[in-house]
Image: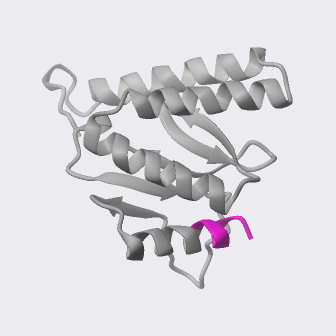
Amino acid sequence: MATNDSNKGGFTDDEKAAMKERAAETRREAKAAKGAKAREADLQAVLDKIEAMEPADRKLAKKVHEIVTSTAPELNAKTWYGMPAYANEDGKIVCFFKDAAKFKSRYSTLGFEEAANLDDGTMWITSYAITAIGAAQEKTIKAQVKKAVS
């Protein structure tokens, strides 16, 4: 993550920006109408975030979006802390995509939140580092998304 020398031990500028994005999302959600119009607006916000990404991140985000929406069409696309995310019918985030550039990381991330049904004993994976998506990675993502919504 980026450092912020003037605020040692506090939030970085990137983290502060993500929190501001989340606050704006919460305000928008509170004002938004329910139903198909809200779902369309949320989807458009996700697509806009993906289009604004750097080319390598955009390619990965588009592929993750395609896989998640085709594997679990019951999930609603929405932004979460300024990232593309996918929520269940209760509005709880199941999974999200964090582009590498967002926090100046060397890899993008596909993460799963507590609403995902991934529990497996006393330890399980909640995020994956992604630098490319080939057939094997697509198969893994599909399997994890299917399990997450089961």
| Furthest-left residue in this view | 5
- Rendered position, 85 above or below 112: above
Quadrant containing the N terminus is top left
- Spot occupied by residue 65 in the image (x, y as percentages of width and height): 53, 49
Magenta residues: mostly which secondary structure?
A: helix
Report the residue at 59% width, 85% height from top: 121
Towards the viewer: 125 or 106:
106
- Spot occupied by residue 14 in the image (x, y as percentages of width and height): 31, 28
Towards the viewer: 78 or 81:
78
Query: Is residue 10 rendered to the left or right of residue 85?
Result: left
Q: Is residue 22 visible?
A: yes
Query: Is residue 5 rendered to the left or right of residue 115?
Result: left
Towards the viewer: 103 or 132:
132
- Spot occupied by residue 86 in the image (x, y as percentages of width and height): 62, 47
- Rendered position, 117 above or below 109: below
Report the residue at 64% width, 33% height from top: 43
| Furthest-bottom residue in this view | 121
Query: Is residue 109 rendered to the left or right of residue 90?
Result: left
Query: Is residue 6 rendered to the left or right of residue 10?
Result: left
**Residue 136 in which image quadrant:** bottom left
Quadrant containing the C terminus is bottom right
Report the residue at 75% width, 42% height from top: 91
Report the residue at 65% width, 73% height from top: 147
Q: Residue 71 in magenta?
A: no
Q: Is residue 113 visible?
A: no
Q: Which residues are magenta?
A: 145-150
**Residue 33 in which image quadrant:** top right
- Rendered position, 118 above or below 111: below
